[in-house]
Image: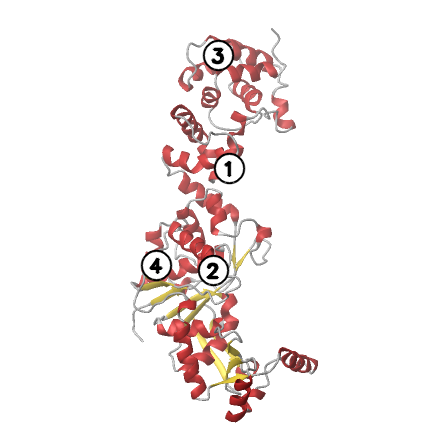
Amino acid sequence: MSNTVRVRFAPSPTGPFHIGGARSALFNYLEAKHTGGTFVVRIEDTDQKRSTRESEENIKEALRWLGINWDEGIDVGGPDGPYRQMERLDIYKKYTDKLLAEGKAYYCFCTPEELEAEKEAQMAKGETPVYSGKCSHLSEEQVQQYLKEGRPYVIRVKTPKNETLEFDDLVRGHVAFDSNKVGDFVIVKSDGIPVYNYCVVMDDALMHITHVIRAEEHLSNTPRQLVLYKALGFSVPTFAHVSLILGKDKKKMSKRHGATSVQQYRDLGYLPQAIDNFLALLGWTPDSDQEIFSMEELCQQFSLDRVAKNPAVFDIEKLNWINFHYMKQLDEDQLLALCLPHLQKAGYASDHPSDDELAWLKQMCAAMREHVQYGAQIVDAAKVFFTEDYQPENEETAAVLKEETAPAVLKMFRDELAALDDVTAETVQPLFKKIQKGLKVKGKFVYMPIRVAVTGVMHGPDLNVIVALMGRDKVISRLNASGLIAD
């Protein structure tokens, strides 16, 4: 086998592209780039009931969005195609015929009822249920007779007895299985379609894959695959089974933990570079305290020997922190592009905004930048401009308006604002100092009551910017609605 590293990502297109799948794809991609190797993407679509081209397109689009581009595979092509399993059936059949001819596989005509009875009997004895192998003893004449009769069949591979199936995993260390607990398993179903474990071995071998980097849940598939590598005469690749991703409750990531697909995070307004950065740190530990990595830095520093055996915990606060870092690097046009779809969905922006509306929205998004960790949060941050639901958010906030000086502050600010020729952030800012001096009150007793009366919250962007964005009429209306100004 060549010394050049060849890795693959081989998803099943059976639903939304899971964040765990994206992590597996990223680790394979980083290993290929770090070593100067080749990254292959193929599609495992033998589950015809659940596989769809729509799901395949979703996977490809998500990978490209994340910047995980492949060197060989679907759409790109390469010397070892086709890169969809259902387009490789003739290849699989050739090897199946070879295994049958060599006596390494056999036809099994057992009915589902017979198999179930056998399984129940074994379990009643406390044994691990494995197929007894009785059809392996059929004579050639019996096999041909059954085939002639049209009896349904599957094809099973002969698993060696009393052997240890073992390998050295780059993440988990030495792993061993008892072949007697594997049994003669099915490699071709009754509909003629090969099973996953069979296809994946042939695909990896024929595509010259040197390293199989995949999720820990595939570890239980490995003993069957080792049996098949030996039966087919293929070299065994190096395995690296990456630990599962858990929610903060230490249970396997699922919908109860929030968004689980790449598309959901994209729809929420997360940035691809933040997702890449975050996923890389789910199971891989750099040799420094660095937490923010560009894709280029990840490619340079990633190595499988720093991938942890322990499960990785999906910390949404950490993702939000990383995404916030990348959002701060966006210019105002990029920030608006990220936030605009969410504002439109909330009814806060027109479907086809005018230049004036876009200019205002850009200013508003820029003002809210420090309070938005991902795109969808702009809706909550900006709602004060679009709704009349701005009452004090809690008792502590409401208490600000009960300060003795609050009525005088609000009245003076209203009158000074009304007298301005032009309301801008620059013209509003001096008003606060003027009120401090005129009423002889400290700054917080000026800023806080105005902010609470106008927005309902105690903290936010610079108050002069908020007032300028909101506009004179709306601000005066809210000051009057506070009920504290006696005309």
Label 3 Cα neighbours within 10 Å, binned few <14 / some 14-19 / many ≥20: many
The residues bearing labels 1 and 4 have C-alpha atoms spaced at a distance of 36 Å
Mark nearer the N terminus (3 vs 2): 2
Hey, what amino acid is under mark 2? Pro
| Front position in the image: 231 or 112 | 112
Q: Are marks 1 and 2 in contact (CB under 8 Å)?
A: no
- Residue sitting at 29 percent across and 72 percent down? 3
Quadrant position of the N terminus in the picture: bottom left
Where disc 2 sits, the SS reads loop
Where disc 3 sits, the SS reads helix
Depicted 5 relative to depicted 178: above or below: above
The residues bearing labels 3 and 2 have C-alpha atoms spaced at a distance of 60 Å
State the image quarter where residue 130 is shown: bottom right
Label 2 Cα neighbours within 10 Å, binned few <14 / some 14-19 / many ≥20: many
Mark nearer the N terminus (2 vs 4): 2
Label 1 Cα neighbours within 10 Å, binned few <14 / some 14-19 / many ≥20: some
Q: Which residue is mark 4?
A: 75
Q: Nearer the viewer, mark 1 or mark 3?
A: 1
Where disc 1 sits, the SS reads helix
Q: Which residue is mark 3?
A: 417
Q: Which residue is mark 1?
A: 377
Q: Which residue is mark 2?
A: 13
The residues bearing labels 4 and 3 have C-alpha atoms spaced at a distance of 61 Å
Figure coloring: secondary structure
Where disc 4 sits, the SS reads loop
